[in-house]
Amino acid sequence: MTDIRLATNDLVPPDRSPRRHLLSIGDLTRDDVERILGTARALEHSLEREVKKLPTLRGRTVINLFYESSTRTSSSFELAAKRLSADTMTIRAAGSSVDKGESLKDTILTLSAYDPDVIVIRHPQIGAPQLVARYTGASVINAGDGKHQHPTQALLDLYTIEESLGRLEGLHVAIVGDVLHSRVARSLVQALTLVGARSTLVAPPTLLPRGIEALGCETSTDIGAIAAADVVYVLRMQQERMEAGEAFVPSLREYTARWGITPERLRPGQKVMHPGPMNRGVEIDPRVADAVDALIETQVRSGLVVRMAVLYDLLTTGPVAVQAAMEVA
Amino acid sequence: MLVYKKEQPVDLVIRGARVLDPAQGLDVVLDVRVDGGVVSQLGSDLPANGHRVIEASGLVLAPAFVDPHVHLRTPGREDEETIASGTAAAAAGGYCAILAMPNTDPVVDSAAVLGKLSELARAEAVIPTGFMAAISKGQAGAELTEMAELADAGAAAFTDDGRPVVAAKLLRRALQYGAVTGRPLALHCEEPSLSHDGQMHEGAVSAELGFTGYPSVAESVMVGRDLALAAYEGGTVHVMHVSARESVDELRRTHAQGFGATAEVTPHHLCLTDEAVRALDSNVKMNPPLRAEEDRQALLEALRDGTIGSIATDHAPHARHEKDAPFEAAPFGVTGLETAFAVLYTRLVESGVLPLELVLERLSAGPARTFGLPVPRIATGEPANLVLLDLGAEWRVQESGFHSRSVNSWLLGETLRGAVRLTVAAGQVAFEA
């Protein structure tokens, strides 16, 4: 029989730094944001190589748990983990035990039995990532919880803006559309405030949450307010969140006429962003979506490197979200 | 109207406590003697005469508390609370009487259900317990219950608590017809088309967290409507769990017009604001929701000036697995019977926000008068309804310490001061630490 030699060091569990999560932009400091964006920049160079895989997270396990449909976020988290050589799997609520009525808590206890390093969670209900963090030993990344937060989206948006305009501080971003139902808007306003940029929310009165100014943004119901902005960030009109009889605007037609982003409403050089998926012809004119000043595809590309950076940061270096393990609500 | 398990009435001498009965203006160190469950003598150096003696110097002896708003979850959700566990929790919190809400399964909307509950309470309630009956059948908001028969069967009051009486016409009928019962209507004021899907108070915190807001006006417009109808019909109404400043304004306006609606407020609305929701802990999710600091201040002022005459816990036990869900998916409600006095004492009395006497009165005589229950008094010839309080005692709120079957307390892990040492309810020892 061949002699099997065990490298005893392999049997020693790796050092576990205090467990950290990325649940909300509110958990981050400006230093955290700058470090993550810096890591993303370094990782972007690695993507230019022929072999795009890095060994950094070899042996680590990343579980993506998606309770809501998603193309961009789930694919980019999965690819980000693979590019860093982590073992990864994506579980979708449809077709899983969730269909059989399993509670989120029980699903998390089940998955945690595999000892994952990271659980990425997208869930339609606010507070789901906090619950997950309470019941798993893994680091938790919030990939969107209801209308609350989508922190990696905000980070990739910052990265995209900085790559395009060379800076963040002092910039003015107008965020236009269905702010009320948008976790993207909430996360982005917080992130922009954190890095010293200005934000203005522009929306019909019924889609501006009362009291949102407390986040440090301005608000306007006049589409003319986008004129002064360096970046116009267009939000999706979330029709799936508009229940029958709960129409927030009289019609999409009227919305488009008054708040839709058309070439006429933009000035040359104004950058346009959209978190996707777009409703062309509703919140954004197709000519705007396809114009050179649109950074929409860049956002998707940024999503990959920023999510790689977040995974890297959570698992290898200093605090991403310094929300220490058990402290979570 | 109040039923409980009859046991041996107690013989006791409580020695040297500070006897504090604000409703009678009593605040003096005395011995109190109880014979056969009745206060027989107040004085100094009372003889023991073979009675058990409790040395109580340094402690406060007050009239025990009355909670007009408790969810006992029986029948239907005995996994969350039973009459035995809920009344034991109440006794541990210093209560000598409670009123239970009818939003059970089945709803307490017939004399048959009420009769069965009373029978159960006679077998297992450790303190006197009353049951409210529903205003509408099945609390569906369509047809009146047989209010007269329910009153004859002992209904303490009528309420559709858990939900509002949406149709103004039905409430008007209830006010008219309810007059024959002599019992008040207890109103849960919420305009559902405005609170729809609301998870927390609408304001800066809900805007930041992304929750659909449950605005103050969703409560206050209904308080305004209900009070207008009650004034028009001359009915007796009690506004439950007031949470918003605007609702207090509505109550004041009504009082100024000479119409006497009563009201209650919960310890959590007196102690917390919507800022507490930032932690996304489902144990701060309740209906009505925690509101802004200005609302909390208005509630405190209303409690001080008597616009709100009662403190009620709205003790709402929930199964652990149901509360252990994302905030947005968790049910509304928190427990409160076992922490009410201590949290009010720690957060409001010690900090000088409310006088101890006022808190004791609003926890006892206030609600008793509102619902026509015997007012607990420390006086010769009165049935012994006593709570012995150790104001200096510190204790930690822990799951293992609850008598309630549920642990959905917003105070888990907190250290409080003010402990209940002894509760005597209707002349029986209901709790002893």
Image (tube, coloured by chain):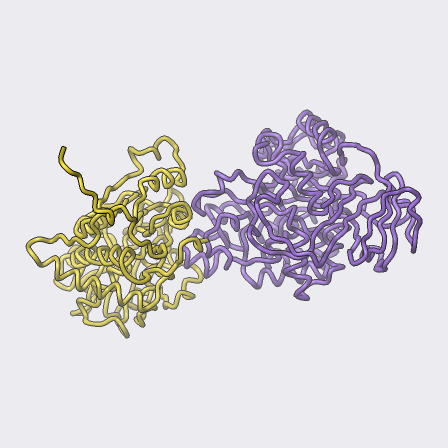
Residue A20 in the image: x percent, y percent? 35, 56
Name of the residue lying farthest toward the bottom: A170
Residue A97 in the image: x percent, y percent? 34, 33
Q: Is residue B352 above or below residue A311?
A: below
> What hue does chain A carry in this figure?
yellow
Q: Is residue A311 above or below residue B121?
A: below
Q: Is residue A166 left or right of residue B207?
A: left
Q: Residue at x 68, y 29 (%)?
A: B117
In this view of the protein, which residue sits in the foreground, B318 or B168?
A: B318
**Image quadrant occupied by the N terminus of chain A:** top left
Q: Is residue A300 above or below residue A224?
A: above
Q: Is residue B17 left or right of residue A189?
A: right
Q: Residue at x 50, y 59 (%)?
A: B275
Q: Quadrant of residue B393?
A: bottom right
Residue B279 in the image: x percent, y percent? 46, 55
> What hue does chain B carry in this figure?
purple
In this view of the protein, which residue sits in the foreground, B166 or A212?
A: A212
| Residue B14 visible to the viewer | yes
Q: How many marks?
A: 0
In this view of the protein, which residue sits in the foreground, A250 or A146?
A: A146
Residue B371 in the image: x percent, y percent? 75, 44
Q: Is residue A19 left or right of residue B224?
A: left
| Residue A279 visible to the viewer | no
